Structures are given as structure tokens and as C-alpha cells.
Amino acid sequence: MWFRCGYEGWCPFETSLGDQVVSPAESSGEGCLGKASQSDGISKRSSLWASPGLSPALLQSSVKQQLDAIEKQYVSAIEKQAHRCEELLHAQHQRLLEVLDTEKELLREKIQEALAQQSQEQKETLGKYLQEEMQRSKEALESAVKLEKEAMKDVINKAVEEERKNLEKVHAEEREMWKAEHARDQERVTEAIQAVIREQRMMSQVLIRALCGWRYLNERYMHKRHGKTKTTFTETYFLCWLSGLYKLSMLKKKKNLSKLTKYLNCKFYVSKKVLGKY
């Protein structure tokens, strides 16, 4: 049987069932001492208890010495086992670190491959979405441009129609003004024509009266002289004089005296030449 002593580890204690000492580490197969040392301790204790004639004090001191020796053995065995366990733990730790490094590298490669694949998939998806978005944007832009063209066309048509109506209105006003001006001009022309007609009638009356007077004078002259040459001379000269008088009245209205003078001089010069032949 084992009991917990003041020192580290378990201390053996005999039971009434026999001399066999069993420790928990031995029961699990991981004892700190070998089977030979355990059997030696058991045999020594058996001989110690079996030897007769020992006093209790000596027996107690020998038991104490034996317990101290066993305790030292256990302490040294525990230290060795702890050192071995520490080495094993260190080696296992190194192996675990190597395994972890290997797993880390594999995991890193897998993560890189997965990230590359995911990046490629995302790139393809993004390119697809971008192409679809560009197509939608293009269609929206085309529809917007078409609507804008239609709106601009409607606005331009309305503006052209309004401008045409304004121009028609202006043209109608100008036409009305032109008609009124034309009517006034027609009235003025009519009045001028009537004035000219009246003047022509007056001139015709004057000419008729002058011609009648000339005929009267010519008849008197013919009765007195009975000469045809003198009559022709008088008739031609009188007609030139009447023509010059008519032109003088017309040119006075135009206020062009220089032309009038030249015209009359020319006419009278021609008349003198014509009359000088007779």
C-alpha cells in the first residue's frame, strides 16, 4: 500500500495482506523504479521485520534509514524520469514544431492555390459583371441619347413652328403694310396720272386753240399773199415753237433748267437749219 509522505513522491507501506508493495505508476506500467530494486527492498524489509531480538529504537532507526534511502532512490529516479520526460517532451515538441511547419507550408500552399483560384474566379466574375454593366450602360446611354434626340427634335420642331408662325405673322403684317403703301402709291399714281391727263388736256386745248389761231392767221395770210412757200415756212416754224413750248412746260416740272436750255437750243438750231432750206 502507498501513502503520501512529506516529500515528493509516494512512499511504500506494508499492509496486513502481505509483503507486496504496489504503486500507482507500477499499476499503470510507467513506474519510476525497476522491478529488481522493488524486489530487493521487499526482501530487505521482510528480513528486517523477521529478525528477532531487535529493540524498537533500533528498529525505528533502521526503518528511518531505509525510508531515507528509499526516498533518495525515489527522488533520483523521479529526477531521472523528469529529465527523460523533459527530453522526450522537447523532442516531441520539436517533432510537433516540424510537423506544424510542414503543415503550415502545406496549408500556405493550399491557401495560396485557393486564393489564386478564388482570385481567378472573382476576376472572371468581375469581368463578366463589368461586361454586363458596360453593356447595360451602353444600352442605357443609347436609349438616353435617343430620348435626348427625340426631345431635341421636338423642341426644334416646336421652335421652328413657332418661328414660322412668327415669320408668317411678320410677313402678314408686312404684306398688310405693303398693301396699304401700295394702295397709297396707287392713289398717288392715279392722282398724278389724272393731273397729267388734266395737264395734257389743258395743253391739248392750248394747242388746239393755237392751231385754230394759226389756221385763222394762215388763212388770212393766204388770202393776202397767195404764196405756198411762205405758208410752209410759217407752219413749220409754228410747229417747232409749239413743240418747244410743250417741252419747256414739261422740263420746268422736273426742275432741270440746264437740260431744258440745251434742248431748246438744239431744237431751235435744228429748226433754223430746216427753215433755212426754204
Image: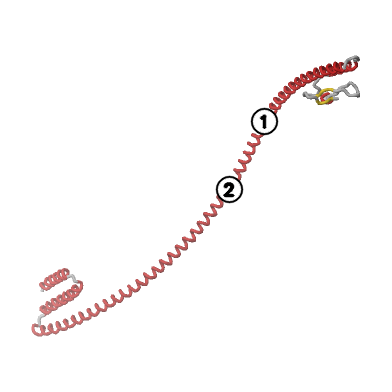
- Residue at the spot x=86%, y=25% of the render? 1
Q: Position of residue 139 (x, y in %)?
A: 56, 51
Q: Considering depth in this image, is 243 or 89 the residue closer to the camera?
A: 89
Q: Position of residue 154 (x, y in %)?
A: 49, 61
| 104 lies left or right of 165 | right
- Which amino acid does the dot numbered 2 rest on? Glu
Q: Identify the residue position indicated by label 1 in the image.
A: 104
Distance of mark 1 from mark 2, alpha carbons?
41 Å
Crowding near the residue tagged with mark 2, few <14, some 14–19, many ≥20 C-alpha atoms within 10 Å? few
- Which amino acid does the dot numbered 1 rest on? Lys
Q: Position of residue 131 (x, y in %)?
A: 58, 45
Q: Position of residue 144 (x, y in %)?
A: 53, 54
Location of the C terminus (image quadrant):
bottom left
Crowding near the residue tagged with mark 1, few <14, some 14–19, many ≥20 C-alpha atoms within 10 Å? some
262 in relation to 88, above or below: below
Q: Earlier in the sequence, mark 1 or mark 2?
A: 1
Q: Identify the residue position indicated by label 2 in the image.
A: 133
